[in-house]
Image: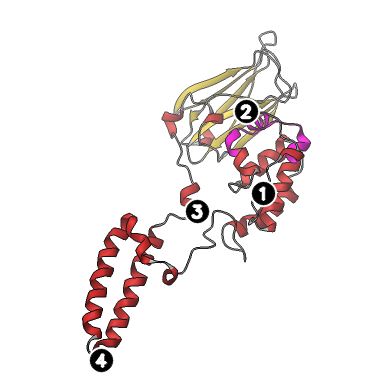
Amino acid sequence: MTYSAARWRKLPQDLPASCSGLVTDLRELKDGSGFTLTELAQATAISRSSWERYLNGKQFPPRHAVQALCKAARQSEDELLARWALAEATWSGRGHTTCPGADRTSPSPLDIDVTELDGAPAGRVVGRVRRALLSVSALIDERPVGTAAGVLLLCAAMVTPAAVLYASRPTPRETGARPPVCQLRSCEGRNPRTTACEDPVTAASHTAADGTRLEIRVSPSCRAGWIRAWPAHSGFRIEITGPDAHPQSAVEARPTRNEVTTTTMIAAPRPSRLRACYFPSPGQPGRECFSGTG
């Protein structure tokens, strides 16, 4: 399904201006490129579901996603990355406002009704403590000397369970972060577009004699690499090799406009030792090879 500017979902009302402005810019760049979400996922090696979250304000887009969109749309990334930096400062809490996902409305521990915590796992424990403390405070309150101590106990009974529950909550980054589905050898043969290896960096790039653009892409979290190449034309083959893994290759059998061809992944404990080779077509002998850097 192609999303046009008129069919985008309304952004969350509590999204700060710097964040909503960035998402709007990304939407406009995506619409201007003519890509559908599926085509955008193929062009950037970032899943369609991730782009849906980024472009609807559900999840803050990482820097590499902004760079990938700019590259796919053939637009300069400098201005958009400057806006991303401002929005990221807000999102991560370094700015003066917070974005969705941050706990903006978390009540003070004193504002929490402790009786409502009894249904939570931590609440069942602290609820019994509260009732015991209340009983003790009632006995102390019968004596004037113990009144102050009773007040302190009551305060502790209210604050402690709320603090325990609040501290046990995962942070937004903890809930939003996804561990990689594979690493090193376990990534071999997997499609980078359908894994959680969505933090790629370009280790090396090369433009072939016929104009085909090639990149060695590496995911630091998955410690795996692959080649992506575009534009597609019938018959070409790409192959990635390394001393620590089995070669992985892909053949473009039929050309498609704006299509990006990728190999499956290869283990990359040392990205600088990856080697990419491009074979133009069966009718054109020879190959062009280049290696990773760093």
- Which kind of residue does numbered mark 2 sit on? Arg
Q: Is residue 271 left or right of residue 206?
A: left
Q: CA distance from mark 4 to mark 1?
A: 58 Å
Q: Residue at x 25, y 73 (%)?
A: 133
Q: Is residue 76 left or right of residue 96?
A: right
Q: Disc 3 designates what residue?
A: 172
* Residue 209 horizontal/vertical position (percent): 74, 22
Q: Disc 1 designates what residue?
A: 11
> Of callouts 2 and 4, which one flags the residue occurring earlier in the amino acid sequence?
4
Q: Kindly state the secondary structure of the residue where label 3 is placed.
A: helix
> Of callouts 4 and 1, which one flags the residue occurring earlier in the amino acid sequence?
1
- Which kind of residue does numbered mark 4 sit on? Pro
106 over 278 or under it: above or below = below
Placement of the C terminus among the 4 image quadrants: top right
Numbered disc in front, either 4 or 3: 4
**Which mark, residue 144?**
4
Q: CA distance from mark 2 to mark 1?
A: 33 Å
Q: CA distance from mark 2 to mark 3?
A: 32 Å
- Estimate how packed mark 1 is, as few (under 14), some (14 to 19) or many (20 or more) residues with alpha carbons within 10 Å: some
Mark 3 and mark 1 in contact (Cβ < 8 Å)?
no
Placement of the N terminus among the 4 image quadrants: top right
- Estimate how packed mark 2 is, as few (under 14), some (14 to 19) or many (20 or more) residues with alpha carbons within 10 Å: many
Q: CA distance from mark 4 to mark 3?
A: 47 Å
Q: CA distance from mark 1 to mark 3?
A: 19 Å
Numbered disc in front, either 1 or 3: 1
